[in-house]
Each structure stands twice: as C-alpha cells, then as structure tokens.
Amino acid sequence: MRGFTLIEFLVVVVILGIILGIGFSLFSKLRPDFNLSSASQNLISDLNWAKSLSVEEQVEYGVKFFIEENKYQIIKYNDISQVISEKNLIENISFEKIEGFSDNELRFNPYGTVRENGIITLINNRNNKTKTIEVRPSGFVKI
C-alpha cells in the first residue's frame, strides 16, 4: 500500500505546530519595531507630500503637530488656512519631542524649502525605542 500512516501524519502536524509557534513568538516580539518603522515612514511620506504640494501649487503647505493627541495635520496656507488631512499615529507610538519648529509647525515654502529646520522624534511606548526624523533647511527629510 502507498500512503502515510496515522502516526507519520501526526508527527508532521506536531512539527508544523512547533515551527508555527516559534514563528509567531518571534513575530510578536518584532511587531513593536515594525509599528515604529511604519509610523515614521508614514510621517515622512506625508511631509514629502506637503512639500510636493507646495512646489506644485506655489502655495505654502505645512504640518502641524499635536503632541498630546498623537496626531498631525497637513495644512494649506492661503488667504485662509485649510486643513487638507489629519492623521493619527499608530497605537503605542507617540511624539517624544519636536524641536526647532515654532508652535510645533513645519512649513514648506513654494520652493520646497522650510522656514525652520528641526527634528521629530517618535517613540514606541512598549519598548521605548525611538526614531528621529530630521528636516533640513533645504526641505530634505530623512531618518
């Protein structure tokens, strides 16, 4: 007869269960790091989006940070300021500090440069790891 016995099948199932258990354990330990990286990449994307909108439309755009609420807004500065988008940080991620920007506000002029350079530091509240995002006078944004 060709095929597997019940014992062979159960051994394979047990081995797969052990491998999945180890993988799940490793993934849950790495998840906070993934969340911090994801939040910082999302913020960088939004900063670059605001910069590109300011160059494209030749109008100032900016990002206003609300540290206590763990959120930020993308704002168009025209005759009347207009909130374009509002984003909340990922769960367990918060702003640790924001330095260099007046009133926690970063503004891009129509050339894509910024009024004030500075840094934004995000922290993962679960493992206290941080990521620092630097905004240079040229408008260049990097981790």
Image: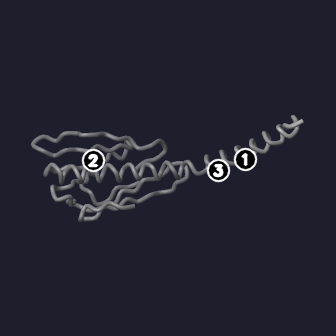
**Residue located 16% across and 46% down the image:** 77
Label 2: how many Cα within 10 Å (few below 14, some 14–19, many 20+): some
Q: Amino acid at mark 1?
A: Ile
Identify the disc placed on residue 109: none
The secondary element bearing badge 3 is classed as helix
**Residue located 22% across and 59% down the image:** 114
Q: Position of residue 76 (x, y in %)?
A: 19, 44
Q: CA distance from mark 3 to mark 1?
A: 11 Å
**Residue 56 against residue 99 in the figure, above or below:** above
Identify the disc placed on residue 26: 3
Label whose residue precedes the other's in the sequence (3 or 1): 1
Of labels 2 and 3, the one closer to you: 3
Q: Quadrant of the C terminus?
A: bottom left
Q: Quadrant of the N terminus?
A: top right
Where residue 6 sits, quadrant-wise, is top right
The secondary element bearing badge 2 is classed as strand
Q: Position of residue 10 (x, y in %)?
A: 83, 37
Where residue 88 sits, quadrant-wise, is top left
The secondary element bearing badge 1 is classed as helix
Label 1: how many Cα within 10 Å (few below 14, some 14–19, many 20+): few
**Residue 64 against residue 101 in the figure, above or below:** above
**Residue located 83% across and 41% down the image:** 11
Q: Which residue is mark 2?
A: 64
Query: Mark 3 touching mark 1, by CB under 8 A?
Result: no
Q: Which residue is mark 1?
A: 19
Q: Amino acid at mark 2?
A: Lys
Q: Position of residue 55 (x, y in %)?
A: 18, 54
